[in-house]
Amino acid sequence: MSKVLILADHDGGKISKTAAELATLGKRAGSVTAVVLAPAGQGDALAAQLSNTEIEKVVLVESDDFARHGIPALVDALAQIVSSENPNAILIPSTARGKEVAGRLAVRIGGGVITDAVDVNSDLGATQSVFGGSFTVSSKVNKGTPVITIRPSAVEATSTSTNPAIEKMSLTISDSAKLVTITGTQPAAKGGRPELTEAKIVISGGRGTNGDFSQVEAMADLLGAAVGASRAATDAGWYPHTHQVGQTGKTVSPQLYVACGISGAIQHRAGMQTSKTIVAINKDPEAPIFDLADFGVVGDLFAVLPQAREAIASKRS
């Protein structure tokens, strides 16, 4: 049976939901050990959030060096843990931060990297969506320990009634990992909606909104969804670039993706076509997005979305 190590990332004192997703994939191959690299004094609270998951053990390291020296310190600690735990694979969230950690870690341990995987099987082979989503390929590292980054929401996390054992580890961060010192940070502004890359439902608007995202936002708030936007919408200044979904924006894999007034150019499709269910609303019946959609509505989003909200609200009541 294989041993899989996962990085349980966290932000603002909260473990990312991707930790449970990584554990679900890792369990297919064998036992799952989570690594929590926490600021001093916050480790126990963070580790406690990993209960009722497929994680069997938590390796907890507390150090203020992680905040002071950033990713090099994280990678230094991870490399030491990999050396002691000797896992068969390491799974990391496929975020900008996660990909940097994965690349640096693979160099340190002499392993291979697979990025943006949407699935992992029992023999630790990965499935990727490549070339702008035009192809799905199977990949496997054939030398060294595989380091695989997994797209958030690529899999539905499973839960258990067991709690993982917690092992506290004391590590010394090397001087070479402390060459950069972070003197200040500015956290990203967050609204009341879910984080785009972690949301189970995403409602996106495009050129068809004509710059008015009010209906898109209203639908998102009704469903507890995140709001996305096409490149055309963000380039026009209609919505922040931080919400762009696409090849040059963020990649999402929610359970439900609703494209409102988005034509479906390959640039956008590359960022959302691994969504489990895709609904398209567009006035143009020939829009490419309909080739990808599971359900399509030919119509004006400003007429369709209010009717959809009314129907959903009536069902709930």
Image (cartoon, rainbow, N blue to C red):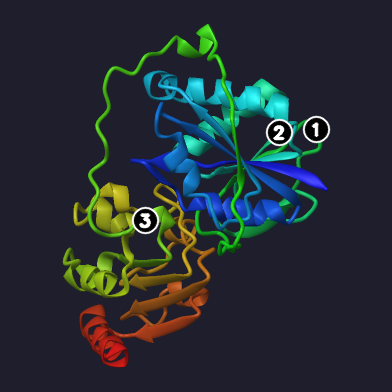
Helix, strand or loop for disc 1: loop
Please say if 182 is above or below 204. above
Please say if 261 is above or below 118. below
Of the two numbered discs 1 and 2 on the same chain, state the one appearing first in sequence: 2
Type of amino acid at the residue the image marks with label 1 = Lys
Q: Residue at x 73, y 56 (%)?
A: 28
Q: Is residue 270 visible?
A: yes
Picture quadrant where residue 312 is located: bottom left
**Tag on residue 143?**
1
Q: Which residue is mark 3?
A: 196
Helix, strand or loop for disc 2: loop
Q: Is residue 245 visible?
A: no
Helix, strand or loop for disc 3: helix
Type of amino acid at the residue the image marks with label 2 = Gly
What is the distance, in whole Å, between disc 1 and disc 2 at their CAs? 7 Å
Picture quadrant where residue 91 is located: top right
Q: Position of residue 146 (x, y in %)?
A: 72, 37
Q: Does the CB distance between marks 3 and 2 fall below 8 Å?
A: no
Q: Position of residue 157 (x, y in %)?
A: 56, 61
Q: Does the CB distance between marks 1 and 2 fall below 8 Å?
A: yes
Of the two numbered discs 3 and 2 on the same chain, state the one appearing first in sequence: 2
**Tag on residue 112?**
2
Q: Quick one: quadrant of the C terminus?
A: bottom left
Query: For mark 2, does the 10 Å Cα neighbourhood hold few (<14), some (14 to 19), or many (20 or more) residues?
Result: many
